[in-house]
Amino acid sequence: MTRKLWLPGFMATLALVLPLATSANPVLDDYKAQARQENPAFKEFSVDAGRKLYTTVGPAQISCSSCHTDSPKNAGKHAKTNKVIEPLAPAVNPKRFAELANVEKWFRRNCNDVLGRACTTQEKGDFVAYVSSVN
Amino acid sequence: MKFRTLIQISALAFLTTAWAGAHAQSADKWHKECSSCHIAYPAKALPAASWKKIMSELDQHFGVDASLSPQDNQEIASYLEKNAGKRLPSGEQPTRITQSHWFKSRHEEISAAVWKRPAVKSAANCGACHKGADAGDFDEDHVHIPK
């Protein structure tokens, strides 16, 4: 009897523990690994710092929120082309922050346009942590 | 002899399929990347020299950074140049489709006020009137100019 229960018990424990061991977002895990490599003292990304970054106005007088609206849950509009910008928050748009190469492409472009420089790993992680926390 | 012909036909079929596959893949990449900010403007809308210039300045693309990875840039540039429009008789190499002579002549009946309507916004927004623009449909019969 004990023997028969061992396997389901083990599986149930695994199901409970696994989501705690890795975060829900693989891209965030990649940034965490990169941050640890750059700074051995790195602990966690900050949702608050990410929220602040989202509304930080850069040299061109624009912020992330200029195109992505005040909430990452909303759809935005391209200022020049009128094209709809789908929401950033994975809670409403699960396609977001799913593939590192694509996320890197947009950070490269948008950090350059908004801040006039590249973003640090810390900033990227904070940003993803914030946007992923919105639900 | 027959066997040799069979080999030749198979090789030709294989190469054609491989070429068609690579072409379709580049076309998909062109469409996916270019249409993330605006409609994927057709390659034939500009001559090859124009595309070459545009693709070499993507980090400053009409005021925004639209840079791609070097591999994607090369693949899309090559697709656009291969499928580009004819070299313009004037030798023009416009980087704006709307500046080309043929664009202006095809749209001469459109007044300046129409281009500025909120639903149109600019001449670059093909999809405002050509509803099937993103799929390459610029048929005059399908044009609907928003009020």
Image: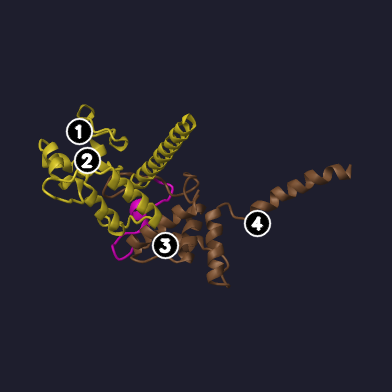
Chain colours: A brown, B yellow
The residue where tag 1 is placed is B145
Image coords of residue A60 (percent x, y): 28, 63
Asked if one can make out residue B69 in the rendered structure from this viewpoint, the answer is no
Chain letter for mark 3: A
The residue where tag 2 is placed is B120
**Going by the image, does A117 lie left or right of B97?**
right
Q: Amino acid at mark 2?
A: Val
Asked if one can make out residue A45 in the rendered structure from this viewpoint, the answer is yes
- Work out which quarter of the rendered image holds the N terminus of chain A and state it: top right
Q: Amino acid at mark 4?
A: Ala
Q: CA distance from mark 2 to mark 4?
A: 50 Å
Image coords of residue B116 (percent x, y): 17, 43
Q: Residue at x 70, y 50 (%)?
A: A16
Q: Residue at x 36, y 58 (%)?
A: A109
Name the element at disc 2: loop
Instruction: From this view, report whether residue A3 is shown above or below residue A123.
Output: above
